[in-house]
Amino acid sequence: MFENLTDRLEGVFKKLRGHGILTEENIKDAMREVRMALLEADVNYQVAKSFVDTVAEKAIGAEVSKKLSPGQQVIKIVHEELVALLGDNAEPLKLDGPQPAVVMLAGLQGSGKTTTAAKLAAQLKQQGRRPYLVPADVYRPAAIEQLQILGERIGVAVHPATTEENPVDICQAAFQEARLNRYDTLIIDTAGRLHVDDQLMSELERIQATIAIHEILFVADSMTGQDAVTVADAFNARLEISGVILSKMEGDARGGAALSIKRVTGKPIKFVGVGESLDALEVFHPDRVASRILGMGDVLTLIEKAEAVVDKQKADDIARKLKRSEFTLEDFLDQIQQIKKMGSLEQILGMVPGINKLKQLKDAPQPDERELKKTEAIIYSMTPSERRNHRIINASRRQRIATGSGTGVADVNRVLNNYGAMLKMLKKMRGKPSMISGKKRRKIPKGMRR
Amino acid sequence: MLGWFRQKRAKPSSPEAPEQAPETPAADAERANEDNDDGRVGQSPPSTKGHNRQTKQESAPAAQSFFGRLATRLSRTREALGRRIDDLFHGRKEIDADLFDELEEILITADLGIGTTTDLLEHARSCVKRDKLSDPQALKALLKEELIHYLNGPRPHEELTLPEGSPFVVMVVGVNGVGKTTTIGKIAKKFQQSSRSVLLVAADTFRAAAVSQLRIWGERNKVRVIAQQEGADPSSVVFDALTVAKKEHYDVVLVDTAGRLHTKVNLMEELKKTKRVMAKQLDGAPHEILLVIDATTGQNGISQAKLFHEAVGVTGIALTKLDGTARGGIVVNIARELHLPIRFIGVGEQIDDLRDFDPDEFIEALFVDHNTNGGRSKP
């Protein structure tokens, strides 16, 4: 959907004759592209503006490296600045001091507070703490029940509250209860509220005044647009938040809101929510979001996605077969099915850096789901012996396969040709098995499953 | 759902009528009743041309009515943030580069996106040059016209018709936390006010307590809710519900689906299946597939709309949470790209806080100057 920033900048510098050195003039053009990329990623207008100014200043003063093209050099500076801005290291929760420690979650409606509260409790429990969930949302129908169910699932106690009670009283009672039962961490799930709702905002202030709170975490939806800044700023002004949790990051949002919120509030992003399962809460990685904001592809996510669906055993199997050129049509079918499991073709391609350049070509092949389906159908219409040995597929067999799969002989021929070409290519690659086996094993992020 | 053709009727006869007073639920119900007798529903497709002519005279009262209606909620917004409501174009003598810069900021800050904003301003610049415009008010009219054009698309939106003798089935879809269940509660109320029998269907069997949440809305409205236990197959819930709806002759069936990120292939497949099951059980169902978009959503909204549209064929959009400071400009992008009608806006948590979408008012609200905020966000 978005162009790669690298490609854009390369374009800017190529346009200039002399193949580009960093001058004030071409930096200005480059900054326009950077600004566009930031705005497309939902970085706040003002934040983008001031960010670009900072980068321009650095770029003009930068030493010209021989290894990098001007475009790459600018990207490098932008990336560094983004990471610097988002914070270098993960900031852990600060739960020291008088116990029980209290963590309060606040945010707009639907930002994911209740789910996040449960995820956080599960994580703290794993770390050996004794968390106590406090449902302080008496407004949304069934919100308390939701937290109770989640608490049961993760084996964390939930304070018994009812909608008749006042949230401030609930928190106070829960605090006493925690002391009695030696829970060491209270996690308060507050109701979603608008930052402009004075009454509800002052309710949070009253909770703050009643019990000593260690961490006030602002939960923000990563898909939020320009308004993220206004909201975060308002919550911070009233409550002096201590950190931010970015929810729903497993989608394709570019996460510009993260940058804006960090810049405006100065508060660290501590966690990101990456799925609906209750262990899908991760410590925030500034560098990954930086790449994502710039549209530089998200290779890490792609690898993770692939690992989440690819069966390790099968992959090793295929790697071995490839080595011995035993890659049959059956294996080909397997591969197609695994690709389909990863998501839509366009989506997968979107994560590959530089793919946009390819898309701009006139006769670039368009990713077509139907082609995959057709290929699948054709292979399914072959007999097992045909799948294992494609050489026996003669004209009459082709005719039968075409009829069986509801396609034409030409389609069958194309599949066979593609397969043949692939075999040829594989032969060339023989001797370099490392290219295809993918031995390195990485942890599969839990959020990828549900 | 009823309202969106109510406008259509009210407007041509007396364009000012719906704007006279803040709407009370009672008046709402009355009008909905009247209009619903013909059994037709559809978006008000104000013909682009007719609107353009009216734009100028209407702009002032429209602005007032929008703020009038949302006054209670929105006034506190502005007080709280110290915002100054100021028409950007007011008090300007000429069209200059500064005005365009400010316009850019306003449009982008309203989440219209850099692409649409650039196109819009390019168009405006060329018109200004061609027609030698110098009056900022004329520029405003021009922008509004183009925005309305984006919202309405090349051809008028199809009207929906309540099917004769069989239930009208609405499937509500969207990503997590946009306000699907709340919207359903409000729509149910609207239909009830026009004495239609409503059946709610809890097809969100995944999220904890989602079924209870809908049940509570059902109790508030005194509407029957069809549900199964958590973790049930949503298709099976829908199948049962439509069986009941057909047998007991319900007029309207509202199906609440689980929130899902548009990038999750398996969950989108589940949604497709739910839709297929409906179609099998009842011809033509679902008659409306309503995509709920949160007004705070940024450019990701396009991706949401595209993928949901690809999967199940969205037929309308509800824009929720417009009572905050977000202006929901992303729907302009969505409407422009996918040619989908925007049916409702949600302006609060109360059961009556659902309004019909009025492009004119919506666009007027986009241009509200928010400059006082600009300074604060500068680091």
Image (cartoon, rainbow, N blue to C red):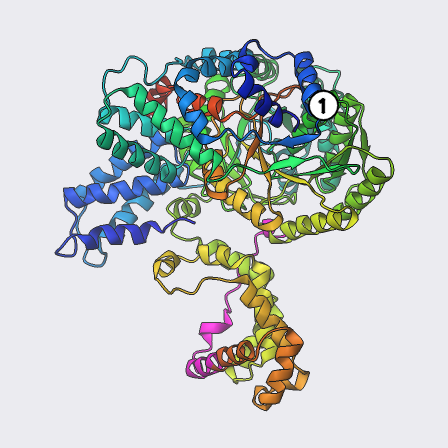
Q: Residue at x 27, y 24 (%)?
A: B99
- The residue most toward the top is B21
Q: Front-most of B188 and A100?
A: B188
SS class, disc 1: helix
**Quadrant in the rendering for residue A372:** bottom right
For disc 1, the marked residue is B189
Is residue A60 shown left or right of residue B305?
left
Is residue B219 shown left or right of residue A83?
right
Q: Front-most of A128 and B8?
A: B8
Q: Front-most of A315 and B157?
A: B157
Q: State yes or no: residue A441 in magenta.
A: yes
Coordinates of residue A319 in the picture (x, y in percent): 54, 76
Is residue B217 shown left or right of residue B90?
right
Q: Residue at x 47, y 34 (%)?
A: B151
Coordinates of residue A445 in the picture (x, y in percent): 57, 52
Q: State yes or no: residue A67 in magenta.
A: no
**Quadrant in the rendering for residue B250:** top right
Q: Is residue B99 visible?
A: yes
**Quadrant in the rendering for residue A399:** bottom right
Q: Is residue A101 visible?
A: no
How many callouts does the rendering have?
1
Which residues, given as a range, are shown in magenta? Answer: A421-450
Q: Quadrant of the C terminus of chain B?
A: top left
Amino acid residing under circle 1: Lys
Q: Front-most of A244 and B141?
A: B141
- The residue most toward the front is B13
- The residue most toward the left is A18
Q: Residue at x 56, y 29 (%)?
A: B44
